[in-house]
Amino acid sequence: MSGMSASRTLFCLGLCLCIIASREAEFNGFNKGYTSVPVEEILSRSEVITDINLARNSITELQVDDFSRFFSARVIILSDNRISDIPNGVFCETNVSELYLIRTSLDSAPVLGCVGDRLTYLNLDYCQICYITSGTFDGMTSC
């Protein structure tokens, strides 16, 4: 049993799918002074992160791969940041169904086509949206 702890033993007979239960959790980065998405800090958690709360920080930009390793993220809160642009595809690797971008510095609606089939709630309240590009809501359906 090299590489396995004595307290955990998995037995498989024939073809099987072994699932090790994990805890789901929120990453609470609310008002922590972040200037960018703390990818490594979020990844250091042992739980499966389903909610990422980065509201009320000093984040000004997102990198296209900031959320690429958070496959289980269903709720992403980026409200009250100074984000002025959201790169195409930044949320594609997530399972996001709720996205909060309240009081950001966005002046154009983000293109969210790659999450359109999963996204059930998008909040852009208090943003100064004055421009919507073609394809912004591709893949999305009305409720």
Image (cartoon, helix red, strand yellow):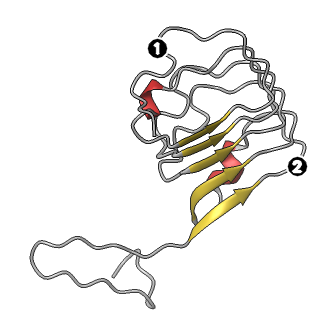
Instruction: From the viewer's side, name the closer residue of 99 and 20.
Output: 99
In this picture, residue 87 sits left or right of residue 92: right
Instruction: From the viewer's side, name the closer residue of 21 and 7.
Output: 21
Asked whether residue 46 is in view, the answer is no
Within 10 Å of the Cα at label 1, are there few (<14), some (14-19), or many (20+) other Cα atoms? few
- Asked if disc 2 and disc 1 are in contact, CB closer than 8 Å, the reply is no
Distance from the alpha carbon under mark 2 to that under mark 1:
34 Å
Tell me, for residue 66, which label it has, or none.
Answer: none
Label 2: which residue? 32
Position above or below: 92 against 29? above
Q: Which numbered disc flags the more N-terminal residue, 2 or 1?
A: 2
Q: Quadrant of residue 26?
A: bottom right
Residue drawn at x 62%, y 66% is: 25
Instruction: From the viewer's side, name the closer residue of 122 and 33.
Output: 122
Residue 5 drawn at (x, y percent):
45, 83
Tell me, for residue 135, which label it has, or none.
Answer: 1
Kind of element beneath mark 2: loop
Position above or below: 18 against 97? below
Residue 63 drawn at (x, y percent):
64, 26
Q: Which residue occupies the extreme front position in the image?
A: 143
Within 10 Å of the Cα at label 2, are there few (<14), some (14-19), or many (20+) other Cα atoms? few
Residue drawn at x 51%, y 26% is: 112
Residue drawn at x 74%, y 14% is: 107
Residue drawn at x 39%, y 75% is: 20
Kind of element beneath mark 1: loop
